[in-house]
Amino acid sequence: MRLKITSISWGALAQSVGPIVLVTAIAIWAAVHFVSSGPPRSLTLAGGPKDSVFETNAERYRTILARSGIKLNVIETDGSIDNLKRLSNRKSHVDVAFISSALAPTDDTGDLVSLGGLFFQPVIIFYRSPKPIVRLSELRSQRIAIGAEGSGTHFLALALLKANEIEPNGPTQLLDLEGEAARKALLDKQVDAIVMSGDSASPATIREMLHAEGIRLFDFPQADAYVRRIPYLHKLVVPAGGFDLGEDIPPAELSMLAPTVELVVHSDLHPALCDLLIEAASEVHGHASLLQSAGQFPSATMRSFPLDTEAGRFYKSGDRTFTYRYLPFWLASLVNRVVVVIVPILVVVIPGLRFLPQIYQWRIRRRIHHRYAELMAVERESLGPLTEERRTALLHRLGAIERSVIAGKMPSSHAEQIYLLREHIGFVRESLSRSAAPAGA
């Protein structure tokens, strides 16, 4: 039989390249599925009651995100508490929500992170009284509209009243009225005071109350004490005439209390969408107003929920990642995914190709060494007593070893080792042929 000597053993080469291809495929699969899948083209945002500040801001976000091809679905809700419940429940399919920083995270909200504080949400209390009151405790035993259950207004009102020893089921009647219904109840003298904020009342309703005859706006002379006792509150000072210069409202400097409103998302929201949302927040909330200075919001510090990692990067760098900064959103997303596929190839394949010759040589030597191991096993068995039948079986095994060596394709670079192996096979065969069967066999 002729020995099959080739310049390369394609079988051994395929076996050498196989592990590299397998590792590369696993790296690419992991990168595509766990590192950088494409961002979704739509988001669902939990806003607030109709005509509230929350809903108004949500509509502005919708317009801004549409520029990048992202459809924002806005859901009408009861306010911050309702938003938090919906966002915490994955089955509701809400991706992002406006939530008051008064609602601290709990074990049930461990999946939620903040993209930053967006704006102050003042607690506004209107009341009917012949003379100004200076403490909320003076409202004890009266009728107070504290906003609908599920709103941040309701939550804040209960917290402020509790600090003044006014609680539900006591002599003070607490009614779940909000917005226009609360305003009408106060004007019709059905309640003595109402609590409002941006997540449950429209700006138009609040403006009307500022100008309503016989209605006073509560000033918080103890604002510093409230801030010390309730850490999520901030003291805001409105100068005289701040609400209306023509009618001088308020007539003197006024202290107000406000938590911030945060943009809260799931921790696995795509990084590119986090960047888009923060940019939208900067456009909507970054301007100066009566209650904030330019650039004060969005804020990485005025929040209750943990700051998202990508949001932290954005606030430090002040911009989007390179591709999203200079390319259209859809193209940047495609480029990022292509890069994620290419990087594992560069990291795995290039080093792997450097070791390919060594792996290939090792596999060829391993095949030769395997035949030597079989040959040594035959020789060890030939050292003991041999019957004619046993010697014949060993000679057949030697023939099989030699045929496998001849039939297997071997590269020419290892021809010398192959011929040397065949000489050793011949040596063992000759030894077996010279040996005589034991007497009496």
Image (cartoon, rainbow, N blue to C red):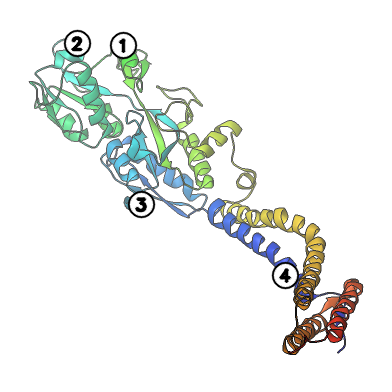
Identify which residue, 430 or 119, lies in the foreground.
430
Question: Cβ–Cβ below 8 Å for labels 4 and 1?
Answer: no
Query: Outermost residue toward the right?
Result: 416
Q: Residues within 10 Å of mark 4 (few under 14, many from 20)?
A: few
Which residue corresponds to mark 4? 15
- Relative to 176, is 68 above or below? below
Which callout, 1 or 2, points at the residue further toward the start of the chain? 2
Apparent side of residue 357 relative to residue 73 in the rendered image (left or right): right
Query: Outermost residue toward the front?
Result: 440
Mark number displayed over residue 132: 2
Residue 216 drawn at (x, y percent): 21, 17
Quadrant where the image shows the C terminus:
bottom right
Q: CA distance from mark 4 to mark 1?
A: 75 Å
Which callout, 4 or 3, points at the residue further toward the start of the chain? 4
- Relative to 375, is 158 above or below? above
Which callout, 2 or 3, points at the residue further toward the start of the chain? 3
Mark number displayed over residue 354: none
Q: CA distance from mark 4 to mark 2?
A: 89 Å
Type of amino acid at the residue the image marks with label 4: Gln
Type of amino acid at the residue the image marks with label 2: Pro
Q: CA distance from mark 1 to mark 2?
A: 20 Å
Which residue corresponds to mark 3? 93
Which residue corresponds to mark 1? 225
Question: Cβ–Cβ below 8 Å for labels 4 and 3?
Answer: no
> Which residue shows up at 16% across the image and 33% down it?
176
Secondary element at image label 1: helix
Type of amino acid at the residue the image marks with label 1: Ala
Residue 239 drawn at (x, y percent): 37, 13
Secondary element at image label 2: loop
Type of amino acid at the residue the image marks with label 3: His
Q: Quadrant of residue 114?
A: top left
